[in-house]
Image (tube, grey):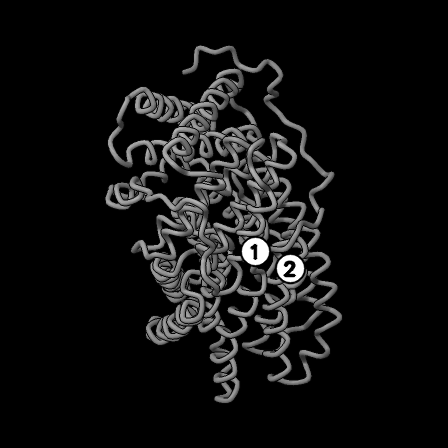
Amino acid sequence: MSSATPFAGTPRVRRLPLAGVLRLGRPSDIWFKPALSVVVAVAPPNLTLLALGRLDLAMYTMAGSLCALYAHHRPYAARARALAGVVLGMVAGLGVGLVAASLTGSAVVLVTVGALVAAVQKALCDATRIGPPGHVVLTFISSASLFAPQTLAQVPGHLALALAAGTWAWLVGMAPGLFRPHGPERRATAHALNAAAAYAENRRPHAGGTAHAAVQAAWQTLLSAGARSETRRALERLVVRAEVALAAPADADPHRLRTWARELRGTGPVPRTAYDSELLGVEAELAAPARRWWSALGPLAPIAMRTALGCALAGYASLALGIGRPYWALVTAASLYQANVTLTWSRGVQRVVGNLVGVLVFAAVVPLAHLGPAALVLCCLAFNFGAEALIGRNYWLGSICVTPMALLITEFAGYQEPGRLITERVVDTLVGALVGFVAAMAVTNRRAGDRVEHALAAVERARARAARLLAEPHPAPGSLDSARRALATALVDLRAGVEAASGEWWQRALPQERVVRAEQAGHRTLAATIRHHRAEGVRP
């Protein structure tokens, strides 16, 4: 526990925001990549089933095809592993749902299974930091499969369809590497350079936090990219230039940083800087044992508990109201859970608004979709593209396309009465959002404060190591580079932990004074390590 005086103004119950929750942000630089990838992954299996007259099997191929939504920001070596894990996780969740559906017809048991699976999926996705769309797509598929009429004899064939489509999605996700093998690394480096340029121009605290996070993300991308090719070495040197700009913003040249960032577009040569020194600490970091993802599962226990409880109660409430598809309420609750209660509230508002507008879109489009099976498939493809194209600007905007797509998927197995579908979806959305948020408030997350304490200790250890190396007349080659990145990582983790805990309810006050002192001392030491690097020959 910290001995520092906690910040007296930290409230135990925080105001839930409304302003800005629906504000649109800028789209991702690569918004079109997941949008196009999911269309390319979904279209061939669905069109094949259409030609065979077996659209009733589309749910199983969709399970595999939707894996193409993941890992677009990862280098291709890391992407290959991540996508393979997503495919296997998707098939495993589908398998649990199908086996449960074949063994019991009890809706209460099925909802309970779905809630437990959703909690596991949430914990695993957060622990592995798989990124958007996280556990929501996995939970949607596994929960829907619980209420698909099934026999045990059919399960292997249906899982084979999902695995085949997942294999195709893996190929779709990896295909851009044939044309831009260093694309993710170049984008991450360009983002770090632009963020550093923005900080050098205005030097606002928010811009500084954003820039440090961008630089850290670039290092993580480069360190996970595999063998250090000459291109990756050149990118590493550019990231160091971004670090130099953060340490000495008054001496930085924002125009030059942005020029380097622009030159990283496309497949042209990586720009060379005035002085290209070797980064000796990278090889040591690559050789060090990687942090095991399962070590992050412990702190995620409260979030997993919220997910299990909220999903179960939402499903039970839906059943009590006589809704025929309780998994919609379950998935709505699962989609809410973010790092803290405040963010969960914001996601709930976005989910409700997006779904309510989405059912209106469905009502407008359903006459077109009912023209025939081909029209149904094409409408689903269009909504797939729209959802991924828009969701990066705000979750509610993407939900406007996700909702009609999910409603149309139910019609692959046969015609559904639109009025009933709309009514059930609206009720399940409201029930899932309300019950899910109540569960988030009921299950406290005291570990958010513990995470801040651990992050503070990590920053202090990393700063002490870097300071010790700075005091040495001749530190070991690469040791200061490695210490600098370790300190930067610890500072970014501390800020993320503080922001997560600041939006959490029912916990002790945060040691704000100690956090401020640790961040100030850490950034001073970080700047000193970079000045030392410059003295060795690196110029901004």
The front one of 358 and 284 is 284
Q: Residue visible at 68% across and 66% down?
A: 420
Where is residue 174? Give x, y as percent.
41, 67
Q: Which residue is mark 1?
A: 262
Q: Which numbered marker is on residue 390?
A: 2
Which of pointers 1 and 2 lies earlier in the amino acid sequence?
Answer: 1
Q: Is residue 140 above or below residue 250?
A: below
Q: Is residue 428 visible?
A: no
Among the 4 quarters of the image, the one containing residue 491: top left
Where is residue 448? Give x, y as percent.
47, 29
Q: Are marks 1 and 2 in contact (CB under 8 Å)?
A: no
Q: Secondary structure at mark 1?
A: helix
Where is residue 4? Give x, y as percent.
47, 11
In the displayed structure image, the side of residue 318 where residue 459 appears, left or right: left
Q: Is residue 430 visible?
A: yes
Q: Residue visible at 73% across and 78% down?
A: 367
Three-letter code, disc 1: Arg
The front one of 324 and 333 is 333
In the displayed structure image, the side of residue 437 where residue 443 appears, left or right: left
Image quarter where the N terminus lies is: top left
The front one of 28 and 251 is 251
Q: CA distance from mark 1 to mark 2?
A: 25 Å
Q: How many discs appear?
A: 2
Q: Residue visible at 40% across and 68% down?
A: 170
